[in-house]
Image (cartoon, rainbow, N blue to C red):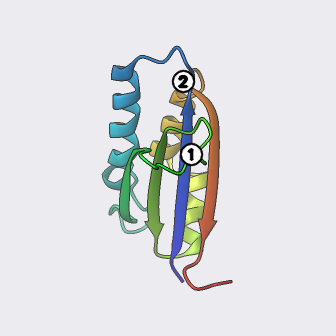
């Protein structure tokens, strides 16, 4: 069953806009850069993201959102726990991101 992975970023106030742009570009590039260990092919089915533009005012300090789709739980597990491209990306954020929220779900599973 497919998995939807949602990530929200709150950048540190001192983060320059060009750094934020670079982080966003690199986050979306994970779709091509994360390679499955067996197939040697990219395994993220789809990935989108952008800057918050909600008029509702419930986003708090989260300014950017990203949504990735995985075919199954095993692909998501590999992404979170082992994928070297993802792990390097996460490590690169330690001085840039102030807060992060992650929500995953399986479509239609309530």
Compare marks 2 and 1 and give the one earlier in the sequence: 1
At 32% across and 63% down in the image, what residue appears?
A: 41
- Would residue 73 be found to the left or right of residue 34 on screen? right
Q: Say if residue 37 shows up in the picture.
A: no
* SS at mark 1 in the image: loop
Q: Which percent across, then down, holds residue 53? A: 41, 46
- Between 37 and 5, the residue placed more toward the observer is 5
Vertical order, 10 against 33 (above or below): above
In 3D space, how far apart are the residues under numbered discs 2 and 1 (Cα atoms)? 23 Å
Q: Which percent across, then down, holds residue 45? A: 37, 68
Badge number at residue 57: 1
Looking at the image, the residue that sits furthest to the right is 110
Vertical order, 91 against 34 (above or below): above
At 39% across and 56% down in the image, what residue appears?
A: 35
- Would residue 93 be found to the left or right of residue 30 on screen? right
Few, some or many C-alpha atoms within 10 Å of disc 2 (few <14, some 14-19, many ≥20)? Answer: some
List the residue tagged with mark 2.
Answer: 96
């Amino acid at each position: 069953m497919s998995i939807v992975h949602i990530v929200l970023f709150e950048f540190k106030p001192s983060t320059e806009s060009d750094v934020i742009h670079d982080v966003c570009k690199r986050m979306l590039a994970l779709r091509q850069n994360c390679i499955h260990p067996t197939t040697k092919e990219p395994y993220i089915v789809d990935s989108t993201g952008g800057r918050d533009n909600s008029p509702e005012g419930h986003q708090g300090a989260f300014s950017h959102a990203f949504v990735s789709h995985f075919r199954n739980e095993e692909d998501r597990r590999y992404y979170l726990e082992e994928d070297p491209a993802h792990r390097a990306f996460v490590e690169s954020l330690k001085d840039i991101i102030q807060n992060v929220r992650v929500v995953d779900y399986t479509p239609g599973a309530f």
